Amino acid sequence: MDDTPATSAARAAAALRIAETARTAAAQRPRPLPSWYPAANGLLFAAGFTLIGLQWVVTTAPWQLTAGCQLAGAVLLVVQCALAQRIERRPGIIQTVPRFISGRLLTTAYLVPLAPAAVLCLAFGLAGLFITTGVSGGLVNWLLLHRERSMTGAA
Amino acid sequence: MSTGPRPPALNELIHHPTRLAVMAFLSGCAEAEFRAVQEGCAVSQSALSKVAAVLESASYIKVRKGYVGKRPRTWLRLSAAGRTALTDHLSALQAIAADAAAWGASVDSSVGD
């Protein structure tokens, strides 16, 4: 076959478009993320971990209050997971790292908050670990989902 | 005779549009059910079966069979070798497109002189 550079380029560009279209079809969300979802996800995560961590802050509280906080925290985390499953999951496809962010940046975004969490764990024990992890992790969730929503042109 | 760098090598196995689409689709997710790949790439069941068999024999994809309830399901995912092959192939395509653009620019400038 004696292709000119122009025809080779046209074929290469067509093949690249096929690949990009197919990859986008696999990576896209089942539906656009609702506007309230990034905040709800982040707040549920933060509130859940904070409520669980409170048991080590208020050590003089009656056991009913401590148990209630633990239960409420666990319920909020379950709700956060259920919500993520319902809104983000796509039947038949197991999603990988979202396309709007690189795998390295995603890992960094979640690892960086662990540094202050570890420091506060040494200073305040498990309360510091849980509350800092919850607040910082919730904030990271919120920011990443908000970024994804704005980059994918959600409705 | 060209004195430029060696042209990038295209992978003949995944150069076919359907194979390329399936590989690219699988690169966009961790694992996908057979039917999801079929719908996502807009190919028939028999065509996808053939493509999957060829790509599996080349160790570019991994096929896992299982059940959801009592219904049999087939799951496909890209192997590490497949991901590398796809990346190399796309790089080669991009290089061809870039070379052609440079060639076109040089032709334009020589015509303009």
Image (cartoon, coloured by chain):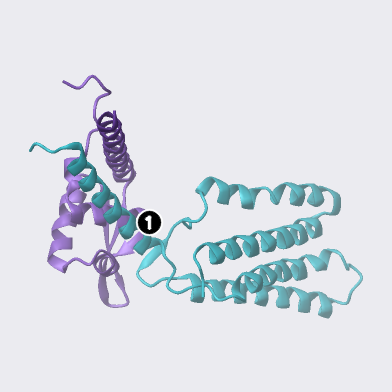
Chain colours: A cyan, B purple
At 65% from the left edge and 74% from the top edge, which residue is drawn? A40
Question: Where does the image place residue A30, in percent across and percent down from the top left?
Answer: 42, 72
Residue A23 placement (x, y as % from top left): 35, 57
Closer to the camera, A62 or B64? Answer: B64
Q: Residues within 10 Å of mark 1 (few under 14, many from 20)?
A: many
Q: Tell me the subunit letter for badge 1.
A: B
Res A64 → quadrant: bottom right
Q: Position of residue A67 (x, y in %)?
A: 77, 76
Q: Please determine whether, in this image, residue A108 is positioned above or below residue A92.
A: above
A52 left or right of B65? right
Q: Quadrant of residue A146?
A: bottom right
Q: Residue at x 51, y 71 (%)?
A: A154
Which residue is farthest right?
A60
Which image quarter is the N terminus of chain A in?
top left
Residue toward you, A85 or A143: A143
Relative image position of residue A3 (x, y in whole percent): 13, 38
Q: Is B44 positioned to the left or the right of A72 in the image?
A: left
Q: Residue lying furthest left in this view?
A: A1
Q: Nearer the viewer, residue B56 or A105?
A: A105
Q: Is residue B22 left or right of residue A51?
A: left
Instruction: Reply above or below: A35 against A151.
Output: below
SS state under label 1: loop
Task: Name the residue rendered at 27%, 41% in the picture.
Answer: B93
Q: Which residue is mark 1?
A: B28
Type of the residue with mark 1: Gly
| Total number of numbered discs in the rendering | 1
Q: Residue at x 64, y 65 (%)?
A: A142
